[in-house]
Image (cartoon, rainbow, N blue to C red):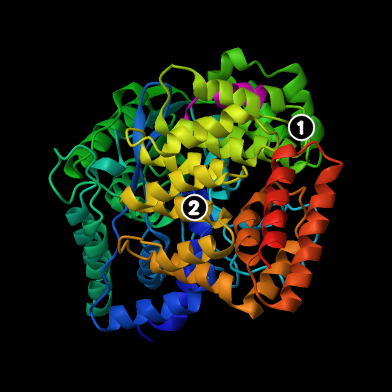
């Protein structure tokens, strides 16, 4: 079977839709256009690859804050091309994974990968076991089996847990620990060297062809943030395939380190570029670090001096921190009670450097228990601390409680501050503000201004448009958004603008749908098909109405249905219009007893447009 067969591409889609869940950027409609047209996407990819006509879209680049003064280069592979990347990788991964030492823990091949809803790599194995955020049960026949929601990773990384546990055991058995990290690891990986390493290990023509295919993609997406590096240097950051390949790049290092500790893998472990060697012989530890530096230089890499040292083994872990992590472990029956105790008696956000890991674990446990006691602390940290890991953890926790807590005023005040803010951080603030249910007029005005500000980062503008779409807009405001589409070339901004413009009604909406200009952006033809089909296909209308009917307005994600309601309001099918009227009236009634003025006003706007345009 060809690697690009429709069956293999369909399986690759199942892996891709899991991978995008923690992409650095989000999609304004959670790739609903790709889901709706997935059979067409698969057929198109199959035909183009078979006929040598396939050309990938450019990667999406975004600088992601590491702390309050530095960033790392982040990338997002367009989801259609991610399918191709996985189609190739799924053929190679089972063979390549066998070449890795047991001392390499991160992103290993998942032996259950062929089963339904299983990821290709083990670090995703718990992803589908997270408690659903919807507070109602959805009929499996109604809920789309290919559901995708971007930006909400699992709070539990099982491979990291295994690495950490092995390191803890070794720290108790041996006297010394040599620890190290690699400077700008992904940015300095040589694609040419990595390709030759893989070809040397998989010495047959079939694998050679797949490896060449894989690296043609990676070289096309060559990540060179400054333009000063030679081409072929740097591996994309932000997808699981890259993380798996980065593991393979250090196979030579694993071999050398295991030889240094006489083959005892209990003394050596690596999680991506986090390296630990345990020994009771300090000379052996020194020798390991000398060899480590030599091997890395041969791979065009350098150790990070500030994180490289030989320490007493028992001192590399903080007993207080480890105790709390263990008490809040997923397998601990009392984890919720322990998380409450940690938050109320121990955590001090003025000493976040010490307590960040237990705090992150605490938020995961409290969120899954639907416990909102940490909202005030999480919101304060979310607004002031831009570091990516903490930012996403606070965001995910806070979003869970938008139906009972109001964040709009605090977020708006922070957005209005004249202090430096990373574009990534500002975008996440807009995204959380979009989920918030309170009606802050200043927020709407600011989002409109930022949406049309050509000097603002594209991600900020896209997120501002996403937020703006949760407010009812006047015709004058919609005209402003229409001008953005006419002048803008960035596909993410155009995509977000199109969704906002579905607020038009009657003939204006029909004109918009018939005249959307997507500037021939790669893969955006599926957005046009999606909007058109929802507007014109009665059977599809009924399916989506049934889906919306069964989704509670109490679910934070209900706002993702607003553009669907905007499109379905214009149906000319009499039977569907009757059902639409019943659904929208039901949702408005559900809002009446809640303090959700923005959502109610938005639903009222849709209802009025529906009534006025029979």
Label 1 vs label 2, nearer the camera = 2
Which residue ends up furthest to the top in the rendered image?
350
- Residue 34 visible to an observer of this rendering: yes
Foreground of the two, 555 or 583: 583
**Vertical order, 16 against 67 (above or below):** below
Which residue ends up furthest to the bottom in the rendered image?
1
Please identify the quadrant where the C terminus is shown: bottom right
Foreground of the two, 285 or 60: 60
Tell me residue 406's x, y (percent): 71, 30
Left or right: 238 as drawn, with respect to 548? left
The residue carrying mark 1 is: 372
User: Is residue 382 on the magenta stretch?
Assistant: yes
Q: Residue at coordinates 25% horizontally, 69% vertically from top-left?
A: 213
Q: Residue at coordinates 14% horizontally, 49% vertically from top-left?
A: 231
User: The magenta stretch spans which residues?
Assistant: 377-391
Q: Quadrant of residue 402?
A: top right
Please identify the quadrant where the N terminus is shown: bottom left
User: Is residue 96 on the magenta stretch?
Assistant: no
Tell me residue 328's x, y (percent): 71, 35
User: Disc 1 or 2, which lies upstream in sequence?
Assistant: 2
Residues at marks 1 and 2 touching, judged by CB atoms closer than 8 Å:
no
Q: Secondary structure at mark 2?
A: loop
Left or right: 613 as drawn, with respect to 315? right
Left or right: 441 as drawn, with respect to 508? right
Q: Secondary structure at mark 1?
A: loop
The residue carrying mark 2 is: 27
Left or right: 198 as drawn, with respect to 361? left
């Amino acid at each position: 079977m060809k690697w690009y067969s429709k069956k293999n591409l369909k399986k690759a889609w199942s892996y891709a839709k899991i991978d995008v869940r923690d992409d650095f950027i989000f999609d304004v409609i959670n790739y609903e256009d790709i889901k709706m047209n997935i059979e067409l996407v698969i057929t198109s990819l199959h035909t183009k690859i078979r006929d040598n006509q396939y050309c990938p879209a450019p990667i999406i680049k975004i600088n992601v804050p590491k702390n309050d003064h530095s960033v790392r280069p982040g990338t997002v592979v367009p989801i259609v091309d991610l399918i191709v990347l996985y189609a190739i990788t799924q053929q190679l991964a089972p063979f390549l994974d066998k070449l890795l030492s047991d001392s390499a823990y991160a992103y290993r091949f998942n032996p259950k990968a062929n089963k339904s809803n299983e990821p290709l790599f083990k670090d995703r194995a718990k992803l589908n076991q997270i408690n659903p955020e919807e507070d109602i049960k959805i009929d499996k026949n109604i809920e789309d089996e290919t559901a995708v929601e971007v930006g909400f990773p699992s709070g539990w990384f099982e491979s990291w847990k295994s690495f950490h546990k092995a390191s803890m055991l070794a720290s108790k058995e041996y006297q010394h620990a040599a620890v190290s990290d690699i400077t700008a690891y992904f940015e300095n990986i040589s694609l040419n060297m990595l390709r030759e390493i893989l070809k040397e290990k998989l010495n047959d023509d079939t694998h050679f062809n797949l490896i060449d295919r894989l690296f043609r993609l990676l070289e096309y997406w060559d990540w060179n943030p400054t333009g000063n590096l030679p081409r072929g240097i740097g591996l994309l950051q932000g997808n699981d395939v890259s993380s798996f390949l980065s593991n393979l790049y250090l196979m030579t290092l694993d071999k050398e380190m295991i030889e240094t500790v006489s083959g005892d893998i209990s003394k050596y472990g690596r999680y991506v570029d986090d390296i630990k060697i345990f020994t009771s012989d300090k000379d052996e530890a020194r020798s390991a670090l000398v060899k480590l530096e030599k091997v890395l230089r041969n791979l065009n890499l350098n150790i990070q001096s500030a994180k490289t040292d030989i320490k007493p083994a028992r001192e590399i872990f903080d007993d207080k921190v480890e105790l709390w992590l263990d008490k809040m472990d997923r397998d601990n029956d009392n984890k919720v009670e322990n998380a409450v105790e940690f938050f109320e008696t121990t955590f001090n956000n003025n000493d976040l450097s010490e307590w960040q890991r237990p705090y992150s674990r605490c938020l995961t446990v409290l969120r899954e228990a639907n416990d909102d006691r940490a909202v005030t602390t999480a919101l304060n940290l979310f607004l002031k601390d831009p570091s990516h890991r903490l930012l996403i953890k606070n965001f995910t926790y806070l979003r869970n409680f938008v139906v009972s807590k109001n964040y709009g005023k605090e977020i708006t005040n922070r957005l209005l501050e004249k202090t430096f803010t990373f574009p990534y951080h500002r975008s996440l603030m807009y995204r959380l503000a979009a989920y918030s249910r309170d009606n802050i007029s200043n927020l709407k005005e600011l989002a409109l201004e930022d949406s049309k500000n050509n000097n603002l980062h594209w991600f900020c503008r896209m997120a501002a448009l996403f937020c703006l779409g949760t407010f009812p807009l006047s015709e004058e405001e919609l005209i402003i958004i229409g001008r953005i589409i006419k002048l803008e070339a960035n596909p993410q901004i155009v995509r977000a603008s199109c969704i906002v413009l579905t607020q038009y009604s009657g003939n204006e909406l029909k004109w918009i749908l018939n005249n959307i200009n997507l500037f021939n952006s790669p893969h955006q033809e599926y957005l046009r098909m999606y909007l058109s089909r929802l507007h014109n296909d009665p059977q599809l209308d009924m399916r989506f109405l049934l889906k919306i009917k069964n989704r509670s307005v109490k679910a934070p994600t209900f706002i993702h249905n607003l553009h669907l309601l905007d499109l379905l309001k214009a149906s000319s099918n009499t039977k569907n219009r009757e059902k639409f009227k019943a659904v929208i009236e039901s949702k408005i009634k559900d809002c009446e007893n809640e303090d959700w003025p923005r959502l109610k006003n938005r639903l009222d706007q849709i209802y009025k447009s529906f009534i006025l345009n029979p």
